[in-house]
Amino acid sequence: MDKNKSRRPKRDAQELCASIPSASPPRRRSRRRDLRDPSATPDRPFQQLGTQATANTLVLGLPASLRAGDLEGGQPVPTQTQTQLPKPSLALPTQLIEQHATSSFADVDVESEGGVKVGGDTYDFEHDEEEVDEALRRNEAAAARALGGEPRNSGGIERGDEGCVLNHESSRSPYRRLAEMVAAASRRDVDGGAASVNPDRDPPAAAASPGDPKRFFSPVVAYFAPEVSKTRRGILGDRITERGGAVARDVNDPRVTHVLTTSTTYRHWNPAARLVSPDWAQACIRAGELRPEDEHPPALTGGVNPPASLSSSPLPPVASPMRLGPPPSSQDASQGHVVVDSGSGADGLVRPWLGKKRGAFACQRPSTAAPVNLNPHITRPLEELAAIYEDVLGGTNAYKARHHKQVAGAVERLDFVVTDVEQLCDPPVTPAFAQKTSTVRDKIRELLATGKLAKLEELKRKPDVEAVLELSGVWGIGTETARKLHREDGVSTVAQLRALAARQPGKLSANQHVGLRFYEEFKERIPRDEVEALAGHVEDAVAAVCPGCSVTVAGSYRRGKTSCGDVDVLLCPSEEFIRGGSQGAPGATVDTVEDILPAVLARLRTRGVVTDDLSTGTVSWMGVARLPDSRERLAPTTTDGAEGDGAVAVVTPKRLHRRMDIKTYTPDEMPFALLYFTGSGYFNRSMRTWADKAKGLSLHDRGFNLVRGNDMTAVRDAKFRDERDVFEYLGLEYVPPEDRSV
DNA sequence: AGGCTGTACTG
DNA sequence: CAGTACA
DNA sequence: GCCT
């Protein structure tokens, strides 16, 4: 069947240009967008905007204070856009912006899963025990009441889909040891190649010439990887800022010079940063001067240090030509305790997830970031109902579900126990609570009065509800298929579905069979270090196929979650590769962007990492992966007699099958791709809504499309080098990944 | 009354 | 095209 | 279900 017929023209245009590098006259892929004019793509009523730039045409430049404010007291880091913006101005009346802030983004706001950061300058993207204790102390009686009948785990601390209180020190993790060994093995594989992966980047240590020895950290902007414990972040961060350095909250902040990580497989997308162990900072502090980074490659504390070449192997996809501004000048940092990232909306910028009302509310209650759900008696039924609306009833009920979840999220974040609906209306928890009528508010009233929801009880009594809920949990089965299976085949449980699938394989699609096979395994969360280990295998394959191609783990991993539902990996070949294929990237076995992914997958399949496919395109893959048996991996048939290591039996505790997505993007698409692939889903929706309403732009994973307005030259001429540029262009205050878990 | 994100694969 | 999925 |  020629299913994608209608979309073909567009894809062809993309693919055509994308595959040009080797075959035809080299052409930058970004031109691709320029090709897409309205006449050429009748199915698309707007024009895709290019990213080539002369940035002076930025219409909606943010107040310079956006960036300048980030580095307090320092000079704004010159960027191609900002330097040419003489006068900050928002194109929209503040009123309009605020309007959207309250409406369009209210949903995002209240659905935060990771704890709201009100102050703006903390590192708390997870809850730790300290905070929990503090909160419990704060409202001990209330907490006791709220948590009374509940097992601690389900009702409180470890609630949520991402888990909260987990150890970050997985230093003894077998996954990690395995990853190291795998890395060592692959180093043998691609020896020589590894070196070329890493362009020489001068260690700042060499260039540093701090005048004041006590401020030797002044050339340094450090970023602490999420796995570094909070305590250590705090202590080292203080020392660094005390000595003139800065600490960034986002690894992709272009000013970051050092990423402090214990992970040997930490991935990011930051051309300027260098990966070092936190031990490096300690060594510098001890020595009273900057020490060579090479002596402290990222490694487990007290563990085996891999060679430096590995530690910095993720190649910055955007090399010097697009490099922006020097890492912060010593002048920037010499002003002292600099924490990159402002966190305040004081300059009139919009934090998308902080609506106006919410902001006011938060100001009144700085402790709103309650780490414990004090109101499970309200949020549980609401969420249960929402799940039924969404997964069972489907259709426009999804919007009902969204609002129920919204309210549940807002209530969950309150730091007091709700006993009366009026408590939710005074400052309204969501805009709806300021309205005259609200069905959700009525439901809460009912819950408080009777302890249950008639609507929920009623739905749960229906026999198909439970069946559809369970069946739609299988990957590839949604509400419609689940309903049909129940209605026509009398299937109510996954077990029954398995029986049916065995009897009549034709009942299910190939993907649904895969989903069914791994039903239990896909429900398991993936610890960060396993994500890293899996990504490490991808990196090995990429290094062999296309040296210089960056590997970035996005998704909830990038948002700093302690466990993830799947593994989201972005590949981005170098500019050189884009231009010259294997000529531009010596050692590459492929020549076009489209060839990378299939080659990488082939390698991963032979290694047993990729076990199944769910959907396969040339630049996008969804499927199943798992850690290979370590012995198989370490005594590969492909290696030259290095079997010695094969004897090392690292038994992986369980090698579950995991959902993995891999996508390939070009360097000019990366800022958009990162934004999209980092999510969260709600965050993306809000940002896209904002782009549309406020700017007349349609935001997607490769760029903007112009929807209305005729100022497209200005937009087209803008240049987007990193995520910050996108935020800036949209008139939004930058939000670091950890704060996007709405 | 109509909108609510935008894209892409599968069958 | 409808259904499902991704963030 | 809420918002415009």
Image: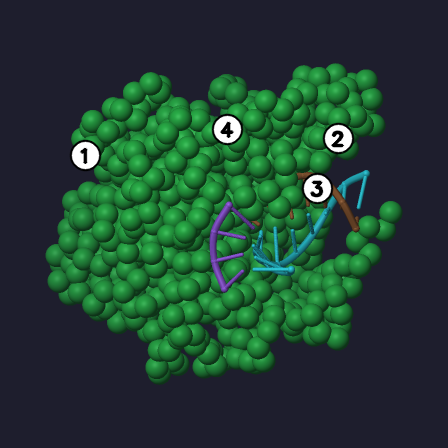
Chain colours: A green, B cyan, C brown, D purple
Asked whether residue A252 is in view, the answer is no
Is residue A670 rendered to the left or right of residue A25? left
Q: Residue at x 31, y 24 (%)?
A: A147
Is circle 2 on the same chain as circle 4? yes
3D distance between C-alphas at marks 2 and 1: 50 Å
Mark 1 vs mark 4: give the one in front: 4
Kind of residue at badge 1 = Arg
- Please report the residue visible at 30 percent of the width from the left and 50 percent of the height from the top: A427
Q: Report the residue at 70% width, 74% height from top.
A: A37
Residue designated by label 1: A138
- Residue at x 29% of width, y 49% of height: A426
Q: Is A654 or A558 nearer to us in this picture?
A: A558
- Residue type of the residue flagged with mark 2: Lys
**Could you tell me which secondary element the residue under label 3 belongs to?**
strand
Q: CA distance from mark 2 to mark 4?
A: 27 Å
Residue type, numbered disc 4: Ala
> Can you give x and y, in whole percent of width and height, for residue A177 in the image?
43, 28
- Residue A396, placed above or below residue A54: above
The percent coordinates of residue A437 (x first, y second) are 44, 48
| Image mark for residue A454 | 4
